[in-house]
Amino acid sequence: MHDADILVIGAGAAGLMAAIWAARTAPGARVVALDGAKKLGAKILVSGGGRCNVTHERVTEHDFAGSTPNAIRKVLRRFEVVDIIAFLSELGIELRREETGKLFPATDSARSVLQALLRAGDQAGVEIEHPRRVEYLNRTGSGFEAGGDWGRVSVRYAVLATGGKSLPKSGSDGHGYAIAQSLGHSLTPRILPALVPLTLPPDHLCRRLSGLTVPAELQVQDANGRRLAAFADSTLCTHFGLSGPSVLNISRYYLHAKLEDPATRLIINWMPSLRSEELDAELQGLGKIKVVNFLGRLLPDRLAEALLGEAQIDREVFGHALTRRDRLSLVKIVTRMELPVVSDRGFGLAEVTAGGVPLKELHLETMESRRCRGLFLCGEICDVDGRIGGFNFQWAWASGYVAGLAAGKRLQGSNQTETR
């Protein structure tokens, strides 16, 4: 390839955003985006069940983990929810709010979002080439040189938007970390799957209840029972263990805490509307009502019977015949059941990556590297991961916008200096 002004490595959500705004900010510049995937925008296309959960009606730094809340807030404020709504509206994509606060395209089609972004890039003059995997990015006297089996290109500025390690089939296989390290960056001590399902032992009741979905609360607790994190939401029992929003949201906190302290526990409350003491009082007052019937009012029958079986209580037992020992056992199993997690389902099924390049190594007002002048980073390669609900997309839009805008302005400034 011939020389370019700005190279964006990775054409996912953050990369496309960076390329569009770099080209818009520096009209006439040659902005090239290279992506190693055969199919562009794979993560966009699979998000939200193919509908693309673009963002959430309310996004704050507290919806994310990884780098410090203050650092995350500084980037999010540069391009907020109202800004992505306006930007997509300009591209012909109107958003619709669901009861949960999630915002989806009115088309209910992720493809419409991807096509709108690609059109915007084309109209701004962005050249998108794929599959062109960038194997290396080297510093030169005038900027950078990037290359792969397709050849090489010399550029003045580069934006690293390669993603993390989640869904490697989409192209984000972690190679971007090696590129960042080669240019002086460090990585967090741990890089783990986030928003990932969890595996339980083969004989666990959750696996026997495969297909069952219920609202439940999950808690990460330390060895002393202190709550480290908690999420209450829809919970799905599967043939391998557990999934669903509550499980995906808690997964990164559990995995990190477990590595810090093997005594960390994951606890589930199948009745999040009741505390242990309240359930105990309800059971003591059942009288001639069967325990299974009482539980069946609050839980699906399959789950109610499975929990009784776990407590080794006969399904025909009446409330007044429930011994104190059995009652306390049932209360613990219903509201404080420990989940013996065997493993997570890995990066192949994780929606996002926890860990990456620390934000402290970037100038947050521009996303430019503090370690390598002229290099900008955005998206999932950074140590920022959000909960389920469109938050990771909002990070991609915001950080991509900041990086692209800054790269375009830097190019304009250098051109003006050269002209003088």
Image (cartoon, rainbow, N blue to C red):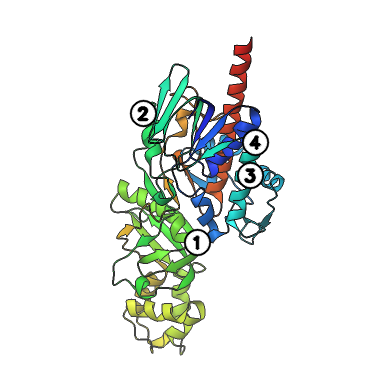
Circles 2 and 4 in contact, beta carbons < 8 Å: no
Give the Cα separation between the discs numbered 3 and 1: 39 Å
Q: Nearer the viewer, residue 414 or 32?
A: 32
Q: Which numbered mark, 3 or 1, is in the foreground of this view?
A: 3
**Horizontal placement of 95 versus 259: left or right?**
right
Callout 3 environment at 10 Å: few (<14), some (14 to 19), or many (20+)? Answer: some
Residue type at numbered disc 1: Ala
Give the Cα separation between the discs numbered 2 and 3: 33 Å
Question: In this figure, which residue is indicated by the disc labeled 2?
Answer: 182
* Residue 181 shows up from this direction: yes
- Label annotation for residue 232: 1
Residue type at numbered disc 2: Ser
| Residue at image location 71% in from the left, 45% down from the top | 90
Give the Cα separation between the discs numbered 1 and 2: 41 Å
Circle nearer the N terminus (3, 1): 3
Question: In this figure, which residue is indicated by the disc labeled 4?
Answer: 124
